[in-house]
Image (cartoon, coloured by chain):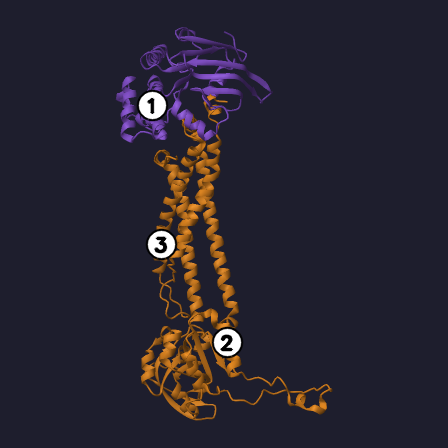
Chain colours: A orange, B purple
Amino acid sequence: MINWKVILNIARTHLLTKMKSTVTASLGVTFGIGAYITLVSFMTGLNEMLDSLILNQTPHIHLYNEIEPSQEQPVALYKDFEDAINVVRSVKPKQSQTKIHNALPILNYLKSDEKVKGATPQLRAQIFYLSGSIELGGNLVGVDVMEEARLYNLRDYIVKGTAEDLKNTENGILLGSGLAGKMSLAPGDRVQVSTVKGDVFPLKIVGIYQSGIADIDNIQSFANLKTVQRILGEANNYITDINVKLLTIEDAPTMANVLEKQFNITATDINEANAQFETGSNIRNLITYAVSITLLIVAGFGIYNILNMLIYEKMKDIAILKATGFSGRDVQLIFMSQAMIIGAVGGILGLIVGYVLSRMIDNVAFETEALPTITTYPINYNIWYYVIGISFALLSTFVAGWLPASKARRIDPVRIIRGT
Amino acid sequence: MELVLETKNINKYFQKPVKFHVLKDISLGVKKGEFASIMGKSGSGKSTLLYILSTMDTDYSGELYLNNELVTGQKSQDLSRIRNKHIGFVFQFHYLLSEFSVLENVMLPAKKLAIKSHAEIEHDAMEKLKMLNIETLAHQRASRISGGEKQRVAIARALINNPSILMGDEPTGNLDSYNSENVFGIFKRLKEEKGLSLLVVTHDEDFAKRTDRIIQMEDGMIIN
């Protein structure tokens, strides 16, 4: 019953003859959507980069032996003092080893679990870097470098040299960039490290590692697991940490609980370790959406205003349409379709403007000491932002058009024609 | 003779600014092929009556029949359809859609009715324009033509769906005597050649005298 062709034809003629208002209204939407797309792409890109800065380097589950005092002191087990109040002063940590008991079987078990993307052994050793008569405290982490590169994007943080260089060099070391700076060392040079026991080993620098977090880069270096075991004089089952990466991060808390009980070991999951991180991301997202929605509402008011004006100008036309047999609904549809056309055109232009602006930001140089892998501002080209953008454009123009269009529907033609 | 339009005991009140009885017990009929005119002083209620007859004003009591079918109480959607199909309306001021061409203005009600194809509608519209000797204006913008021409275009538009009745609210009120004569001539011809029923509200006594019947109104009542 609704004759869309006629309605759209009238709507189109109205829009074309009022080109200025149409363009103004569309530009309002274009600006709103364009700003939304740019803002949300940029903000989430930045968020993702910051997230990955921490999360990519962080295992989903970290297994290690915690140094802690016994929950129950021996006196509590002694029957004679059962009813007494026991006070133990100066409680010391339990005598235990830092190495993980049965580390290799645990590793194999984890690697065969289908929920696990990978598990890597690590050996953390306290060492001193020797530079002439200066001793710099720090730690050396023995790793399976290819697995680290696969699971934790280690390659992104190797600013000089490659992961393969380390793998192929028996006594190689990936030196922290802060350390390299302090000791004026470059790949190819040698650095001497000393264990806590006092044994000195020369290592060959195969690359420079820069995590972007200065406190780490100033103390930490990587070497092959076997090299570190040899430096410490330990067997090849001496492993202090096991890092687990899962296929889905959501499984981490439950799996950490299970592993803790199963192997009598300390297991921390990523949410526990980075709880504050999530909060930061959420708040940044909230700000992004608040600003975007404000922009779109402003654009919506623009459309509302222009349609209202248009309807006042077109009072006589509305009366004549109604007198010649167009129903109130037809008239409403005419103005609604004008609003929707403005919304669609403005929205699509907005997506294009947003994309172009994102592209431009994407190409702006952004080099910072803290982020070695980043050369330009990060942008997140998620198709969903574009879907949300165009939906919001249509929704806001629909709402903005609804009131004026309903008003047009209710206009009494007799009053207009008789001029009362 | 068959009645095209018939009213039974129509009463209407204005609520604002004070309650006022505008139309008192109006009962009248317009026969098929009749050219009737309504005359009366300002405020006698003649225009009010016409807008009720045109189905645009629904705020009244009584009954209105069009082609022996009760119109009173129908839904506004259906009333729009009735107006579109059965009633042609010509106003005192031309009331064309100024952004559209003359031809589009004439075609619009037929497009809304959507019974004929676009080509047929365009053909019909050209026919109507030819009949009124304004076919040369077809592709002009409606805002670019003279007052007399606009009124003829409005008549063409009122005729496009071949209505049962043509109503006019002082259709010559805004025209000079030459154009008034012209419009009257057109109405007369439509009645004689096409057998169209016409009901015209007018102030112009000369105009009214030449119609088939004058319905004289005073203080909301028909007095003849």
Task: Give the amino acid at mark 2.
Answer: Ala
Residue B147 % position (x, y): 35, 18
| Residue A76, numbered label | none
Q: Which residue is mark 2?
A: A256
What separation in Å lies between label 1 and label 2 (alpha carbons)? 81 Å
Seen in the picture, residue A276 relative to B52 is either above or below; the reply is below
Q: Residue at x 39, y 81 (%)?
A: A175
Residue A355 bears which disc, if any? 3
Q: Residue at x 51, y 20 (%)?
A: B63
Q: Is residue B218 above or below residue A363?
A: above
Residue A135 in sight in this render: no
| The image quarter in which residue A313 lies | top left
Crowding at mark 2 (Cα within 10 Å: few <14, some 14-19, many 20+) = many
Instruction: Return the chain for callout 1.
Output: B
| Residue under label 1 | B160
Q: Position of residue B44 (x, y in %)?
A: 52, 13
Question: Is residue B77 shown left or right of residue A362?
Answer: right
In front of the other: B130 or A176: B130
Left or right: A266 as drawn, with respect to B1: right
